[in-house]
Amino acid sequence: MARSLARWATAGTVGPSPRAARRVPAFGGAGDSRRVRPSPVTHRASSSFVAASSATASTGGKGVYDDPRTYELAFGFREFDKEAAFLASLSERIGTGRPPASLLELGAGPAWHSTAVASLCPGAVAVAVDNSAPMLERARERVAESALNERVAVVEGDMTRLDAKACVERAVEMAPRESKQAVARGFDVACVLLGTAAHLVNTEDALACLRAIHDALAPGGVAVLELEHPYDLFDGQLTDAQGDAWDREDVTRGVKVLVEWGREGDAFDVATHVVERTVGFNVLDVATGAPANGYVPAEEVVSCRVFTAPEVDLLARLAGMRVCATYGDMDEDVRLDSEEAHNMLVVLKKDHQ
């Protein structure tokens, strides 16, 4: 599940390129998501946002991952069908040389990518792992809504203490007879997307996660990590502890979510590259501007580690894998050093058993 928001919006960005101005976490929406201001903002982004945010602090509202409806409203805009096609392409071009017969999604949240890959690839099975009870419930609902109960398993688990063998066995149980043997060798693709790997703030946890991924992968399989772009470490924004805010409207529901991503004064440790980021959601009724019925404001300080590419390379080697490709988005045409790079995609490969 996304506990760090690593994909960044270009909508509303002012300047010659997305990297020229402060980038905004882009789970907020395409087209209907907008910055509250085009320049770096603090928690005083707008009067309505301040009022809602203050209410959150005073009432001790939910954590940001406790209400999947709000989470999906804020971050569910991404084109998951296209992202599934990107994962399938990696499997064919870089991995086993075939479309994925199996996918392991860690920190799966609502299981967006598991259901998208299973829908895209005939016969493919997926195991979606998360440790949040509300998200697990929502993931199971999504699987049922997609009529994928026979091919997508939602499993409670911690990516730092993953039972790789059990995940493979669960995939084999679901696999069609003709692909059971291939699936038994391990997953063709594993993924930790939407910035979830940023919560591996301790090196020991990061290495444990990658070693478990190695054990779960088939020979030739690939793992895809989506991380904050390392540019964020070097442009001064993290040490300046500035924040951003944006909103996204759901016309069908008649509600608008206000998202706070970072707040002035949030701590950043230059030694560990861990930022203690304040994240908040507040859902308003579009017609009245009042808090929307049925939604509870959420605010939480989320620990996020910003990795550099050499760090990931070393961790991968220690886990028995190697970096075989990097991208600046879930798009093979966007290079990591491109002005269009919104995040850092690192593709790891397991060459041998």
Image (spheres, helix red, strand yellow):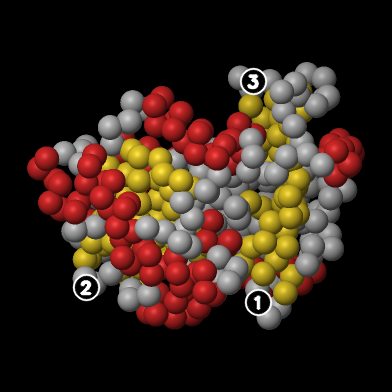
The amino acid type found where label 3 is placed reads Arg
Q: Is residue 253 above or below residue 96?
A: above
Using the numbered discs, state the Cα–Cα distance from disc 2 to disc 3 in whole angstroms: 50 Å
Location of residue 46 by image quarter: top right
Disc ID at residue 30 = none
**Mark toward the start of the polypeptide (3 vs 1):** 3
Label 1 SS: loop
Using the numbered discs, state the Cα–Cα distance from disc 3 to disc 1 in whole angstroms: 42 Å
Residue drawn 80% across the image and 26% down it: 291
The spot of residue 18 in percent (x, y) is 61, 58
Q: Is residue 14 above or below residue 66?
A: below
Location of residue 290 by image quarter: top right
The spot of residue 245 in percent (x, y) is 75, 47
Q: Is residue 194 above or below residue 120?
A: below
- Which circle, 3 or 1, is nearer the viewer? 1
Which residue in the structure is indicated by mark 3?
253
Using the numbered discs, state the Cα–Cα distance from disc 1 to disc 2 in whole angstroms: 32 Å
Which of the pair 189/228 is nearer the observer?
189
Which residue in the structure is indicated by mark 1?
272
- Which circle, 2 or 3, is nearer the viewer? 2
The spot of residue 248 in percent (x, y) is 67, 35
Label 3 SS: loop
Which residue in the structure is indicated by mark 2?
352
